[in-house]
Image (cartoon, helix red, strand yellow):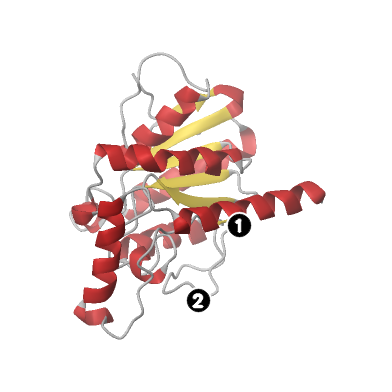
Amino acid sequence: MPARRSRSADWESLNRSIVRCQRCPRLREYCRQVAVEKRAAFRDCTYWGKPVPNFGDRDGRLLIVGLAPAAHGANRTGRMFTGDRSGDWLYRALYKAGFANQADSRDADDGLRLMDCAITAAVHCAPPGNKPLTEESAQCHGWLERTIDGMPAVVFLALGQIAWRATLAEARRRGWYEGRVPKFAHAAQVPLAGGRWLLGSYHPSQQNTFTGVLTEPMFDRVFRAARRLIASGQPGGDQVGCP
């Protein structure tokens, strides 16, 4: 019990530090600008307009790594993947797989809870055009390090190539993976040291979901694989191998 309390305090301290971060002036200015100008549909909303902290179960064995908050999604609501179409897709899939208590993600006070799962991002501020600069991604990487330090996660699900590269870089830094860099692919599974796994998925952005690049059955398959890996430590039947 004391260990759980300590981890809780560390998690809350980490999130407070993320919110206070000033490392990337361009991103901080963009988040504030969006919060003032707003989108017409949200003109009566008070935007968060700051780095978005981690969300979910600090004791979770699944850690989802996204790209960055959406300008009018998490940058508005202050909660990862909340208030936009990407979040609709993600939380529907999490609920279906038993990682969330509901399928909706309207705002930070809607009662949504995650079980055995947490969500972080490669970059915690909304970037212009959803494209952080290389140096901005590097500045934010320390938060990913500390997030992984503070969780007992054994499965890491990277949503998109930027999250894939960031998670793999951290796995290599920790000595969890050596050899050739595995190519990103949807539903790819990469074994890491200590019974850990890296999974890949197309990001549930409208660019992918509206065009059929990512479908609900494809997304559900990834979370079924995560469940199997958490439960058994063995690759599931959907494994895609990596070069």
- The x, y position of residue 51, in whole percent, is 40, 58
Q: Nearer the viewer, mark 2 or mark 1?
A: 1
- The x, y position of residue 233, in whole percent, is 60, 31
Give the vertical position of 16 relative to 174 (above or below).
Answer: below
- The x, y position of residue 98, in whole percent, is 56, 57
* Mark 2 or 1, nearer chain start: 1
* The furthest residue to the bottom: 44
Q: Which numbered marker is on residue 12?
A: 1
Q: Name the quadrant containing residue 36.
A: bottom left
Q: Which numbered marker is on residue 206?
A: none
Task: From the viewer's perspective, tell me whether residue 115 is left or right of residue 5.
Answer: left
Q: Nearer the viewer, residue 139 or 97?
A: 139
Task: From the viewer's perspective, tell me whether residue 216 is left or right of residue 12.
Answer: left
What residue is shown with label 2?
110
**Residue at mark 2 to residue at mark 1: CA–CA distance:** 20 Å
Mark 2 Cα shell of 10 Å, populated few (<14), some (14-19), many (≥20) = few
